[in-house]
Image (cartoon, helix red, strand yellow):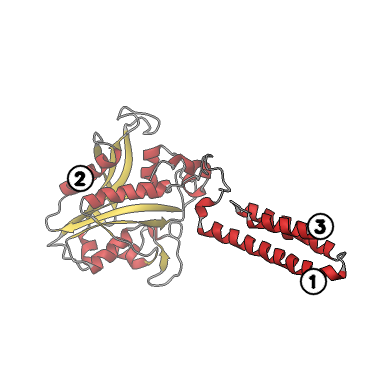
Amino acid sequence: MMREKIDQLLSEVEELKAKSEQEIEEIRVGLLGKKGKITQLFDDFREVLPEQKRELGQVLNKLKTAAAQKIEELKSVLDENPETKESAYDLTKPGNFFEFGSRHPISITRNEILSIFTKLGYAIADGPEIEDDWHVFGALNFPPEHPARDMQDTFFVTTGDNPILLRTHTSSVQVRTMEKVQPPIRVVCPGRVFRNEAISARAHCIFHQVEGLYIDKNVSFADLKQAVLLFAREMFGENAQIRLRPSYFPFTEPSAEVDVSCNICKGKGCNVCKGTGWLEIMGCGMVDPNVLEASGIDSKEYSGFAFGMGVERIAMLKWQVKDLRHYFENDIRFLREFKTEV
């Protein structure tokens, strides 16, 4: 009776097939598990008559070995032919949705500004955020008593004859460029700057700038105006107009503030432009001869212009975001508004 069960089970083992790892595991448990068929036969073997133990013991061990070999064979066949596996996944279901991120609006605006000026032949220059007084103020014609040197505006790291501070503008990169490179010079200087100001909707102690510098022979104010106009039309549309208002900066003479026609109301007047039809976007001017001489450039042979804009300011005009604090809070709800931008 027991011999018949062994022979029948041996025949079944030889015919076993499986299409998945799960099926192989079910076969193993069904044969060799604690309650498996072969395990049960070994339990019954204890009741066999002594004269039958030798013969039945041999065929029972043969069955156990055959079962173990068959299981290993099924595993190897499954590994060698993965296409025969039954997928553990329903391939008809839609795939998992991954929400892609995007660049920060400040990065988007910065990259667009740089793209415009690189097309005009400007190289990109970079410099340290922790600077000395000479590169931030002294070389840029700031007199010792200038208000910008006051502790209320600048974050000082050390004091002394040439104190270390957090740069208040990226003009320091222009100075370093003029010290190292002989004209002609045509660069834009993007970067983060710091000023000791109260944080509000329209001001922050950290912000970003892009400043530009062009030095060559016979550079005129007309060249400056043309460069600013080309930028405005690339950034705000081909119908954008600019106006220049007289201003003052220690490192340029003459100096001007640049306004662009409001791209919201098309110059008719609205709450964004406060009814004027114009929006301020940057400061600019011809490089002061003292600045050229301080960096070792002959002001009698060379002239140049410089300009600078706040990236947050341009971003505010581009997307009509009126609170600067949104750019620094990293609120995911705000950043998702720019997920289509690249």
Going from N to C along the chain, the mark reached first, 1 or 3, is 3
Identified by mark 1, the residue type is Arg
Q: Where in the figure is residue 93, as x and y percent of width and height?
A: 54, 39
Residue closest to the eye, 256 or 339? 339
Identify residue for label 2.
225
Going from N to C along the chain, the mark reached first, 2 or 1, is 1
Q: CA distance from mark 2 to mark 1?
A: 108 Å
Q: CA distance from mark 3 to mark 2?
A: 107 Å
Query: Helix, strand or loop at disc 1?
Result: helix
Residue closest to the eye, 182 or 46? 46
On screen, residue 79 versus residue 312, left or right, reads right
Q: CA distance from mark 1 to mark 3?
A: 16 Å
Query: Helix, strand or loop at disc 2?
Result: helix
Q: Residue at x 61, y 55 (%)?
A: 21
Q: Residue at x 22, y 66 (%)?
A: 181
Identify residue for label 3.
1
Residue 243: image quadrant is top left
Identified by mark 2, the residue type is Lys
On screen, residue 79 versus residue 324, left or right, reads right
Residue 292: image quadrant is bottom left
Q: Is residue 163 shown to the viewer in this render?
A: yes
Q: Residue at x 40, y 46 (%)?
A: 312
Front disc: 2 or 1:
1
Around disc 2, counting alpha carbons within 10 Å, would you say few (fewer than 14), some (14 to 19), or many (20 or more)?
some
Identify residue for label 1.
54
Q: Where in the figure is residue 282, as x and y percent of width and height?
A: 31, 46
Identified by mark 3, the residue type is Met
Q: Is residue 36 shown to the viewer in this render?
A: no
Q: Where in the figure is residue 46, as x and y percent of width and height?
A: 86, 66
Query: Helix, strand or loop at disc 3?
Result: loop
Residue 45: image quadrant is bottom right
Residue closest to the eye, 155 or 262? 262
